Amino acid sequence: MQSHEIRQRFLTFFEKRGHTIIPSASLIPENDPSVLFNTAGMQPLVPYLLGASHPSGATRLANSQKCVRTVDIDEIGDNTHATFFEMLGNWSFGDPPSSDGKGRAGYFKEEAIEWSFKLLTDKEEGFGLDPKRLYVTVFEGDDNAPRDEEAFNIWKKYIPENRIYFMSAKSNWWSPGDNGPCGPDSEMFYDVTEKGLGDMTKEEYLKADDEQKVVEIWNDVFMEYEKKDGKVIGKLAKKNVDTGSGLERVTMVVQGKNNIYETDLLQPIVHKVESQKSIKSDDGRAERIIADHVRTSVFMIADGVIPSNTDRGYILRRLLRRAVRLSHSLGMESGLETLVGAVVQIYKDAYPNLITDVVRIREEIKKEEEKFRLTLERGMKEFEKTTSVIVQPDALNIHFTVLPPTVVTNLYQTYGFPIEMTRELAMEKGLSFDEKAVEEEMKKHQEISRVGSEQKFKGGLADTSEISTRYHTATHLLQKALQVVLGEQVHQKGSNITAERMRFDFSYGEKMTDEQKKKVEDLVNEKIQEALPVKYEDLPIEEARKTGAMGLFGDKYGDIVRVYTIGEGNKKWSTELCGGPHVQNTSELGHFRIVKEEAVSAGVRRIKAVLD
């Protein structure tokens, strides 16, 4: 059975049982600043689990939700972990009692467990899995709630009780935090060994779980309690059911595999990697990681994420740069963008937007790879050179295994190596580094750069690298665009530039509207697209004043000042006094994007922006 059929069987099964099928939400959470990505099927539905009415009016829903998790990133490449996955889920939001006259609950533990078992094992409606390979865990009870005998007794109808294990709250209790609905859950595991494990004691089962001989494939959460300030205070007036079943893992067991990378959801991408490599890896893990990271990147970019040094963009950059580094180690001749087609081919029916967006997705991946490959080889040589000295024994034949923090920060600032990548490279050589010391070193470097820049010029520029130079030039475009959109009264009040972003303070008494921000963005990008030349001339200060050049004339300039002009003739855009470094043409800047606009003080606003 192919993955697309598994996904559809799940949805059809629950649609027949009164569930409204809803589409997957974006990977980017809506109105939830606590996380960068949706990490579970229930996450976009939390308001309805908390009591709000769903727009459809339905009390039963089902879907396949796109998710991204990086908490287990070190496990990627094993048999069961992936950064992107689809979560099949079915929910009941306080579904009312049934009208069968027996007073039976309309939708709670009885139905959830019955349907889970039927879908997993039924050969006509479900996936036809062997019930003899199924194991179940239920909540063992604690001070918050009693042992879940009800779930245990329901499960006994379907599988032998010696394959049902009572577990602690650590694994079998769901809670959103210290407050809100919560409750016990019941997890289903499947035996993926060739011969089958048969009946096991709890200790044997735990060992098999640790060795990935049994794999979790479904989780039914029964939200019947309410928590306040970390303690359960009673039962909910309306009980909810929240279930989740990972499509990758279900596909794995249905297709008779012992790992997700041999399923039709990932194998075509892995094969594409293998066809392009020239160096054989020891265990195939690098190929798996590349396949996983490219698949995740495709979905991230399709949902509007682009590589950057902050938030979601940093996660995307981290995944792509890790994949580039591994592809380099495998001697892959073609770029990562050549793998995009394999991803789209797998998901084109379920997510047709990937087809319409494929060109942009390829371009973003190619651009990021090219940017990183420029320094990757030099950075790797620097890492090898540094570590080869460190791992040499000293006169007392003692091997040093701690990487100096300066090495880590230098690889980040000079070669664009994410800290996580250096950590991974260090681990491969049996090395480590002090995370806190690296953080302090980064802060120290930033402070030195800040002080140095203040001594050099007034632009708030943290360094004179290529990216900081681009940001500095962009502030000229931004100031003029603000004057065009908001009025000539707008003037720069300060700026701060790092290799990650630009911060620009300006005089204005009101919060900018979304429309105004969009107009400013569009104007800046328009001038970038026009490929305007950037030139300067040194003039006596009085002559510079007469040109109309913008500048902080209250400052103590010398007799001769430098005046930068962007554009020429009828395409002249701005003229400013400035002592900082600039690009030669606006086409070098990239795409300008406002990240945030906020108040700094009375009459002063601040824009934070990035160049993608």
Image (spheres, rainbow, N blue to C red):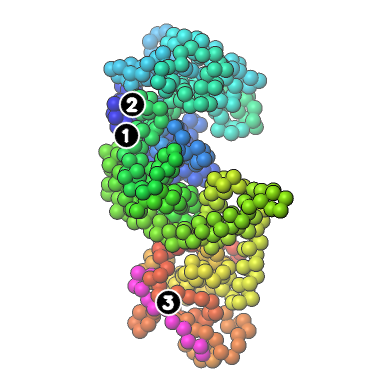
Residue holding disc 2: 255
Q: Position of residue 522 (x, y in %)?
A: 38, 65
The amino acid beneath tag 1 is Asp
Q: Which residue has dot 1 on it?
A: 264
Marks 2 and 1, how far apart in space? 9 Å
Mark 2 vs mark 1: which is more N-terminal?
2
Answer with left or right where residue 283 lies relative to residue 445: left
Q: Are marks 2 and 3 in contact (CB under 8 Å)?
A: no
Query: Which residue is label 3 attached to?
Result: 584
Whether residue 211 can be seen here: yes
Q: Residue at x 46, y 59 (%)?
A: 377
| In the image: residue 356, left or right of residue 582 | left
Q: Secondary structure at mark 1?
A: loop
Depth check, front residue: 177 or 362 = 362
The verdict on residue 333 being magenta is no
Labels 2 and 1 touching (C-beta < 8 A): yes
Q: Residues within 10 Å of mark 2 (few under 14, many from 20)?
A: some
Q: Could you tell me how far apart the alpha carbons at marks 2 and 3 are, in whole angstroms?
A: 57 Å
- Amino acid type, label 2: Gln
Distance from Cα at disc 3 to Cα at disc 1: 49 Å
Q: Position of residue 125 (x, y in %)?
A: 30, 19
Query: What's the residue at 63%, 72% (across, down)?
Result: 452
- Can residue 605 be seen in this snapshot? no
